[in-house]
Amino acid sequence: MSDYRWRRAIAVFELFGGSFGLQVAWRLFGQVGRIGIWFPLLVLVIFAGTTYAGVLLWRDHPQAETVSAFAQMVQIPVFLSPSIGYFCIAGLGLQLKWDTAWNLAFYVHIGALFHLAWGGDAPVTTLGINVVPVAILIWLLRQPESTPAQSTEPALPN
C-alpha cells in the first residue's frame, strides 16, 4: 500500500476512534453532577484531538503528523494497579499486558474506551502497551516532512 493510502487509512482510523470517543464524552457530560466536570472535559479533549488529527491527515495539513503523533501517544500506555489505572483506545486497540502475578494477556477492542481510575481498581499491578498506536506512531515518525504538493496521488475534493 502506498504512503498516500496508509495516510488515508490512518486518518479514517483516527476519525472513527475520535468520533466514537466524542459520543463517550457526550454521555459523560450527562453525569457531571455525579462525577464532576474535569473527567468529561479530559475525555472530550483526548477524543476531539484524535478526531482533529484525522481531519488534518485527511487534508494533508503540514501539522498533521505532529497532532496525530500526540493522538497516538496517549493511547500507548496501559497501567492498572490497586491505587490508579489508565488506558485509552480510540479506534482499534491491541493491548499486550503483563502483571505482577506473572500473567501475560492481550485485549482487543474496536471503538472508543477511556479508563482512568483511582482507589482500588485492580488486584495486581499490570503494565502494558497498545500495539496499534505504536505501529502508527512509528509509521508517522518515518515519514519525511510533507506538504500537500508532495502527495503521490491526485488530491480529492474536500
Image (cartoon, rainbow, N blue to C red):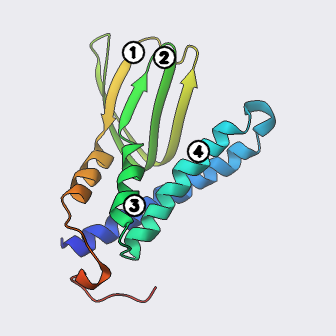
In this picture, is 147 found above or below 6?
A: below
CB contact under 8 Å: marks 4 and 3: no
Q: Residue at x 27, y 46 (%)?
A: 134
Measured Cα–Cα span from mark 2 to mark 3? 30 Å
- Find the distance from the CA under tag 1 to the CA under tag 3: 30 Å
Q: Along the horizontal axis of the image, is 127 left or right of 23? A: left
Tag 1 near tag 3, CB within 8 Å? no
- In the depicted structure, whether residue 151 falls above or below residue 23: below
Residue 125, numbered label: 1
Mark before the other along the chain sequence, 2 or 3: 3
Which residue carries the number 3 mark? 13
Q: Residues within 10 Å of mark 4 (few under 14, many from 20)?
A: many
For mark 3, give the secondary structure.
helix
x and y percentages locating residue 153 in the rendered image? 24, 85
Q: Which residue: 44% across, 62% down?
A: 53
Which residue is drawn at the image coordinates 53% and 18% (left, top)?
Answer: 121
Name the kind of residue labelled 2 in the image.
Answer: Ala
Disc 2 packing (10 Å; few <14; some 14–19; many ≥20): some
Q: Residue furthest right?
A: 33
First of labels 4, 3 by sequence position: 3
Along the line of sight, the residue nearer the viewer: 122 or 139 = 139
Label 2: which residue? Answer: 122
| Residues at marks 1 and 2 touching, judged by CB atoms closer than 8 Å | yes
Q: Which residue is mark 4?
A: 43
Could you say which quadrant of the image residue 56 lies in?
Answer: bottom left
Q: Position of residue 48 (x, y in %)?
A: 55, 56
Pointer 2 with pointer 4, Cβ within 8 A = no
Separation (CA) of disc 1 from disc 4: 24 Å
Q: Callout 3 environment at 10 Å: few (<14), some (14 to 19), or many (20+)? A: some
